[in-house]
Amino acid sequence: MSIDVLTQWLASHYLQIKFIHVGFATMWLWSTSVAYLNYLVPVFRAWQENPEDIDLIKKRNWVMERFDEGVILEHIAFPAVLITGLSLFLVGGWGPQSYWLAMKLVIVVLVFLPIECFDYWLSHFGGNKAKIRKNITNGDSLNSPRYERAIHFHWWFLIITTPIIAIAGVTVLYLAIVKPM
Amino acid sequence: MNAHSISHHFSVNPKKIRLIAAAMGFYILLILWPAFDLCRLIYANDPHAFSAQRAITAAIVATAFSLYANWQMGRLCLYSHNT
C-alpha cells in the first residue's frame, strides 16, 4: 500500500482516529492513579517510617508486584497513543509550525518516551519484582538484596516521575484539546 | 522484631531531593526549551525563537517546576504521613 493510499484512508477516518487517540491518552495518563495514590503511596510511606517492620515490608512487596501488573493497561495505551498520534500528524494538517504541536512533540519525545521505556523495563522485563522473586534460590524475597534494590529503584523512579507526569501529562492533554496558538 | 538479615532502610534526605528537583529545572532550561525553540526556528521560522523573552519565560517555568517537584517529591518520601 502506498503512502498516498494510507494517507487517504487515514484522512477519511480522522475523527475516529482522534477518538481512539484521546481515549488511549486518558487511559495512559490515569489508569494507575487510584492504585498509586491510595494503595502504593500509603504503604510505601508507612514502610519508610518503619523500615524494618516485617509486615509492612511484606505489604510493600505485594503492593509493588501488583502495581507491576497494574501498569499493563498504561503500557498497552502508550504505543496506541503514539501510533494514532502519528496518524493524526500525517493527515491532520497540523505541523511543528503550530506552537502547541511543537511543544507537545518535544514533551512526548524528550520526556514521555524515555520515562516509558524505563517503566517498561522496570515493570515487565529486568526490573519486574515477581520475576526477580521467582529467581531467588530459596524464594525468600525478604532477605534478597537484589529484590530489595529493585523495590528501592522502582520507588525512586516513581518519586521522581510523579511531579513530571502530573505537570507534563496535563500540559500535553491541554495542548492537544485547546490547541493554543 | 527484625526477622531478616538485610537492611530495608530507604536512603533519602532533603538535600538529595533538592538536587533532583534542580536537575529537573535544568533539564527544562537546557534541553526542553532549546529543543522547542529549535523546532520553532526550523519549521516555523519563528522570529521569537531563542529570544531573551523566551529565555526569561523558560527560566520562570523551570524555577516554578523545580519548586513544585521539590515539594511533591518531599511529600512522597520525606515527611511523616501523619503530618
Image (spheres, coloured by chain):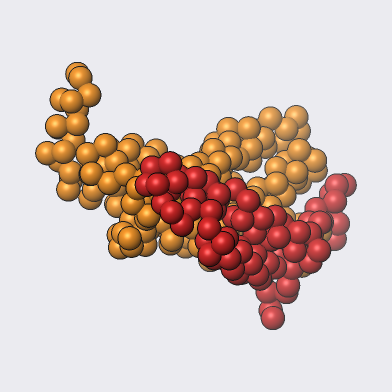
Chain colours: A orange, B red
Q: Quadrant of the N terminus of chain A?
A: top left
How many marks the image carries: the answer is 0
Residue A159 position, x and y percent, is 64, 57
Please state if A149 lies on the left or on the right of A89 as rendered: right
User: From where the camera sits, is residue A62 visible?
Assistant: no
What is the residue that sits farthest to the left in this orientation?
A12
What is the residue that sits farthest to the bottom in this orientation?
B83
Residue A68 position, x and y percent, is 55, 45
Residue at 80%, 53% (x, y): give it. B8
Residue B42 position, x and y percent, is 43, 41
Residue at 41%, 51% (x, y): give it. B46
* Displayed quadrant of residue B17: bottom right
Say above or below: A169 vs A106. Answer: below
Q: Quadrant of the C terminus of chain A?
A: bottom left
Residue at 53%, 58% (x, y): give it. B51
Residue B12 position, x and y percent, is 79, 60
The front one of A25 and B66 is: B66
What is the residue that sits farthest to the top in this orientation?
A1
Please state if A98 lies on the left or on the right of B12 as rendered: left
* Displayed quadrant of residue B79: bottom right
